[in-house]
Image (tube, rainbow, N blue to C red):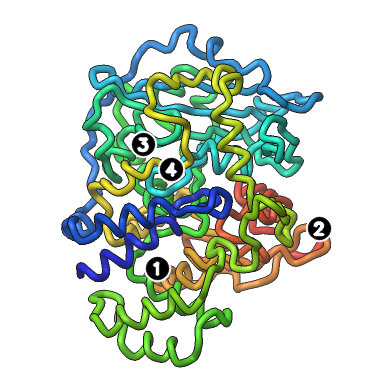
């Protein structure tokens, strides 16, 4: 099991929902984990992320919404007709623990649902990734100072709330240093407390249809938060009007992740038949032998320096800044890092930079390597949610080698659902956007030509299937 843990942790960069080091080059998370991996207990992998349903802290929110209004971000293009807010919600008054959010309303906010977006990691930023490089209204230009408008932003069809969680991620912080040793359970509890307080600050959204969306390690975050919401209906607190969840390239099962990743490498020509045969013959992925480990090491080396979040994308080169075939700049993470560490930007966002140590970072590696509880699988939780009546969708960019489409297929097979609408091609415009299959209690969608960060690589296709999800419809067949 120790070897299995080592292999799992070596995937942590791959599970971080940012343009993970394609931009800034060095992979500090992998190095830190390599230094620490044999010092850590494997027991945490087997802990259940059980939640305790108790009343939570809800503080006065009077006047805080107006204070959080963002009048204009530095470098923002003209002609923007939607409102922006950002700031902090205290989730533990005694500890001084506060989570940072960025909220963009739709141009028609009264008629649109509310969506919470969560990036994974664990311990990576939804502001730097989701908002600034994926589905948010702006992307940072390569001058590190100005923003361009994303016409396929998801606030075209929803009011979108980005949360930096847990404390220690991005601009979120705590005055109690022990809070930075955290895990799945505390992250779910704090996110729930955040939501209750945020809805008091924005009471007009209390009765709004609410959806939770995320990617990668949010495959843990989302089901655990939903489980808490559905089972913690305190009569003296807000009842959240949860209608559905959507999780992309989701890390949800440890064993499936390992098996699927190497199957994907072989099926896409990144490793040889001999290495694949060796892995198939010697690995059962529930207990990794030394022989299996040796084959996996060879496979990791044999695939070379490929950007595993999109196996067909170029790496970032500061000297060339070559866009990928999708038009997405692989150096975008660099631009976001510079932009969010600009004092004028931090002031506009109401970021309390004295509360964080050092500059804003896309991931907090110290928090990530000290993660306390991380169940091997969240499939039992998803299975339970399938019986609640909420809409459940999984989606997968099909050029992602980190948490590939085949991994999700293995996990779906474990859930054992019956097919309601057979696999079919869906369309965005005149082209196939991907493929979809509707099961009895959930839907699975692929996005053609998209990597791990689907809205980055295929923004039009991403907005198309996301709109279908919100409408409770399958992605469109040919127009």
Confirm or deny contact between disc 4 and disc 3 (CB under 8 A).
Answer: no
In the rendered image, residue 343, in percent from the top left (x then y), is placed at: 56, 20
Q: Is residue 197 above or below residue 449?
A: above
Question: Looking at the rendering, which quadrant does residue 66 occupy?
Answer: top right
Tell me which residue sits at (73%, 44%) in the image: 152
The disc placed on residue 257 is 1
| Residue bearing mark 3 | 166
| Residue bearing mark 2 | 429
User: For mark 2, does the 10 Å Cα neighbourhood hold few (<14), some (14 to 19), or many (20 or more) residues?
Assistant: few
| Residue bearing mark 4 | 363
Local secondary structure at mark 1: helix
CA gap between label 2 and label 4 equals 35 Å
First in residue order: circle 2 vs circle 3: 3
CA gap between label 4 and label 3 equals 11 Å
In the rendered image, residue 90, in percent from the top left (x then y), is placed at: 36, 21
Question: Looking at the rendering, which quadrant does residue 61 occupy?
Answer: top left
First in residue order: circle 4 vs circle 3: 3
């Amino acid at each position: 099991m120790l070897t299995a843990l080592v292999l799992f942790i070596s995937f942590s960069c791959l599970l971080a929902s940012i343009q993970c080091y394609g931009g800034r080059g060095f992979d500090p998370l992998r190095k830190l984990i390599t230094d620490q991996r044999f010092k850590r207990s494997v027991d945490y992998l087997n802990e259940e992320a059980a939640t305790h349903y108790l009343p939570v802290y809800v503080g006065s929110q009077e006047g805080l919404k107006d204070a959080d209004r963002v009048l204009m971000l530095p470098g923002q293009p003209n002609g923007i007709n939607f409102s922006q807010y950002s700031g902090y919600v205290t989730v533990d008054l005694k500890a001084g623990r506060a989570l940072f959010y960025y909220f963009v309303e739709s141009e028609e906010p009264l008629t649109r649902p509310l969506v919470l977006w969560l990036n994974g990691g664990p311990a990576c930023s939804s502001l730097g990734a989701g908002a600034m490089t994926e589905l948010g209204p702006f992307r940072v230009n390569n001058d590190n100072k100005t923003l361009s408008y994303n016409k396929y932003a998801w606030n075209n069809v929803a009011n979108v709330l980005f949360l930096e969680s847990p404390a220690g991620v991005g601009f979120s912080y705590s005055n109690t240093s022990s809070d930075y040793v955290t895990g799945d359970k505390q992250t779910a509890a704090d996110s729930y407390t955040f939501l209750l307080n945020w809805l008091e600050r924005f009471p007009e959204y209390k009765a709004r249809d609410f959806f939770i969306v995320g990617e990668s390690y949010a495959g843990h975050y989302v089901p655990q938060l939903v489980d808490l919401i559905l089972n913690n209906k305190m009569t003296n607190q807000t009842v959240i009007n949860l209608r559905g969840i959507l999780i992309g390239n989701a890390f949800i099962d440890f064993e499936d992740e390992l098996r699927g990743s190497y199957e994907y490498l072989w099926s896409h020509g990144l490793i040889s038949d001999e290495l694949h045969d060796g892995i198939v013959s010697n690995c059962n992925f529930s207990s990794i032998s030394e022989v299996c480990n040796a084959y996996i090491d060879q496979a990791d080396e044999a695939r070379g320096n490929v950007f595993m979040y999109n196996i067909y994308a170029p790496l970032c080169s500061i000297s060339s800044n070559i866009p990928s075939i999708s038009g997405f700049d692989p150096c975008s993470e660099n631009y976001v890092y510079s932009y969010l560490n600009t004092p004028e930007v931090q002031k506009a966002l109401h970021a309390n930079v004295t509360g964080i140590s050092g500059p804003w970072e896309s991931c907090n590696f110290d928090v990530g390597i000290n993660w306390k509880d991380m169940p091997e699988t969240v499939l039992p939780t998803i299975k339970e949610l399938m019986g609640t009546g909420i809409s459940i969708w999984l989606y997968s960019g099909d050029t992602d080698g980190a948490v590939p489409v085949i991994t999700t297929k293995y996990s779906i097979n474990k859930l054992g659902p019956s097919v309601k609408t057979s696999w079919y091609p869906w369309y965005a415009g005149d082209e196939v956007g991907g493929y979809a299959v509707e099961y009895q209690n959930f839907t699975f969608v692929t996005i053609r030509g998209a990597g791990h960060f689907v809205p980055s690589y295929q923004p039009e296709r991403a907005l198309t299937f996301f709109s279908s999800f919100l409408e409770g419809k399958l992605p469109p067949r040919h127009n």
